[in-house]
Image (spheres, rainbow, N blue to C red):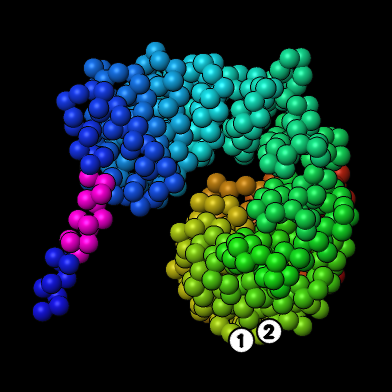
Amino acid sequence: MACVLEAPLRMSVLSEVTASSRHYVDRLFDLDPQKVLQGVIDMKNAVIGNNKQKANLIVLGAVPRLLYLLQQETSSTELRTECAVVLGSLAMGTENNVKSLLDCHIIPALLQGLLSPDLKFIEACLRCLRTIFISPVTPEDLLYTDATVISHLMALLSRSRYTQEYICQIFSHCCKGPDHQTILFNHGAVQNIAHLLVSTSYKVRMQALKCFSVLAFENPQVSMTLVNVSVDGELLPQIFVKMLQRDKPIEMQLTSAKCLTSMCRAGAIRTDDPCIVLKTLPCLVRMCSKDRLLEERVEGAETLAYLIETDVELQRMASITDHLIVMLADYFKYPSSVSAITDIKRLDHDLKHAHELRQAAFKLYASLGANDEDIRKKIIETENMMDRIVNGLSESSIKVRLAAVRCLHSLSRSVQQLRTSFQDHAVWKPLMKVLQNAPNEILVVASSTLCNLLLEFSPSKEPILESGAIELLCSLTQSENLALRVNGIWALMNMAFQAEQKIKSDILRGLSTEQLFQLLSDSDVNVLMKTLGLLRNLLSTRPHIDHIMSTHGKQIMQAVTLILEGEHNIEVKEQTLCILANIADGTTAKELIMTNDDILQKIKYYMSHSNAKLQLAAMFCISNLIWNEEEGSQERQDKLRDMGIVDILHKLSQSSDPNLCDKAKTALQQYLA
């Protein structure tokens, strides 16, 4: 019975709620234009700051009527302007409000309104458009569907300080990625917006600055252009530096620092330029201090991480500025008990955003420790650092997990830390857990870290092997993601280095011959080189060489032939010849070369190649085949002499390359012994 009554019950509540709002909508349909105008003005006053009223009016169908009045040429300019104001107010409510407005095709209607000659109406339309476009539910591409819109907006920039503020804000929110940057750049965004940086209005200056920060981000074309633009005789980088000064508002300092950071990363400003070293870097470090707001600390740390990511000198400089490494440890202490006592709102705010702080700290630690061993040591010695990273690996937030893995990867480049801190905290355990089930972007960094943990001097290598890593890594080599294929094979290569025969056999079994051939014919040279590196590591020490060649010899010889005949670079061919040299070092395995005339002819060809590296690698094969102290050496020497190998050795013994000359003389001595 309750189920039957539920729907009517809801209806009665809804009608009660909306009845008080209905008269506002009814007045929009009055035949007297003056009454309609007054109705819209009353509606405007009723919805200001009242989300419930906004939702009611949307439910009652106010939006289509307001849009109709806004688009009617018979409507007075005042009425059309007031309609735009009310629509803007409705858009300032919830995300659902914005969705309702978008469903009614508000954007084309407002863009059409921008063609009006009346400035007040244009400003109202732009203000409403701004509110809609800054909402996360609005697709940015709606701004770019009509090619004429951007050029019209550029033309409107000169109309008033309000058009400047709103248009710049629309651009900075709708510029997502290189395609949007190119469209805005090609429509003259740099030239049209540059002079706004010296506007008398702070809001205009700020929105113009935000525009440049998104236009220049990861965009060399824009960055290179900005360096040479001047306003009132002053170059833009100098204007940005002025905006960095301590007496300027924090958001201005931060946004200027972002502009200069993007220009520096794009190569438009040198990393040792005073504006970076003495202005941008110290400003961003300041933003990380305790007395800054949470959002400022997050943005400051993330921008600084990006600035110093690839430059060791900037990393060193940042690490010794204002005790940054210790200062970042505070990022993990939110929310603190002090804020809980002083301000409940602040506590709630901190709780919601604490993960952003941790993410930013991990990112910055990763950049700081990317190259310098002393910095890594300082980071790891910071209170509870390894525990924080281990905890970060299992956080619910994907962004924090990714940043924690990046931080771990950066620190895993340290031989010393792999042997000590990484072992003490059994970092490999949570890392293996991350690798079991994670999005690709986390898998790529986690598998890179695993490559380092599998180096022969790492104490983590043994337990990782025992936890089923071979199967996991073999599955990564089959990934469609190139970085994962490279990392999977790289980790296996590290695992096979000086490994026991059982581990090598497990790797070959896990990979399968079919997958090995797949990797050897991969279009990416990195995959190919790492696969050859794996084969070379598998085929080391005689008993291992003989054992592997007895079970996989035919397939490996096929693969070697395939590569030596293919169109590959010198490094690939050299690595392949080194594999042959390893096979030639086996006791029984060398017969697979001696009975393969095709391979012997290839070795002979590379002995006379124009590249000394390939000649040297081919000679290693010959030396291993003719070595006197081994059984059957006489027969092998005779066969190779008949092929003309000795004549080539005599020629090479006269070579101007000392390595080739020495190797040839050593080989010839085997014939004389």
Q: Is residue 210 magenta?
A: no
Rate crowding at label 1 as few (under 14), some (14 to 19) or many (20 or more) other CA atoms within 10 Å: few
Q: Amino acid at mark 1?
A: Glu
Which quadrant holds the C terminus?
bottom right
Left or right: residue 608 compared with residue 663: left
Question: In the rendered structure, are the residues bearing label 2 and label 1 in contact, judged by CB atoms less than 8 Å apart?
Answer: yes
Q: Which mark is residue 118?
A: none
Return the x and y of residue 280 as percentages of the image width and height. Answer: 79, 40
User: Which residue in the protein does label 2 denote?
Assistant: 462
User: Which residue in the protein does label 1 denote?
Assistant: 466
Quote the CA–CA distance across marks 2 and 1: 6 Å
**Secondary structure beneath label 2:** helix
Q: Amino acid at mark 2?
A: Glu
Q: Residue at x 69, y 50 (%)?
A: 296
Q: Is residue 16 magenta?
A: yes
Left or right: residue 453 compared with residue 554: right
Q: What main secondary structure does the magenta stretch of the protein show? A: helix
Q: Nearer the viewer, residue 478 or 576?
A: 478
From what the image shows, is residue 172 above or below residue 502? Answer: above
Q: What's drawn in magenta, residue-wise? A: 10-22
Q: Which quadrant would residue 75 be assigned to in this image?
A: top left
Return the x and y of residue 128 as percentages of the image width and height. Answer: 42, 33
**Secondary structure beneath label 1:** helix
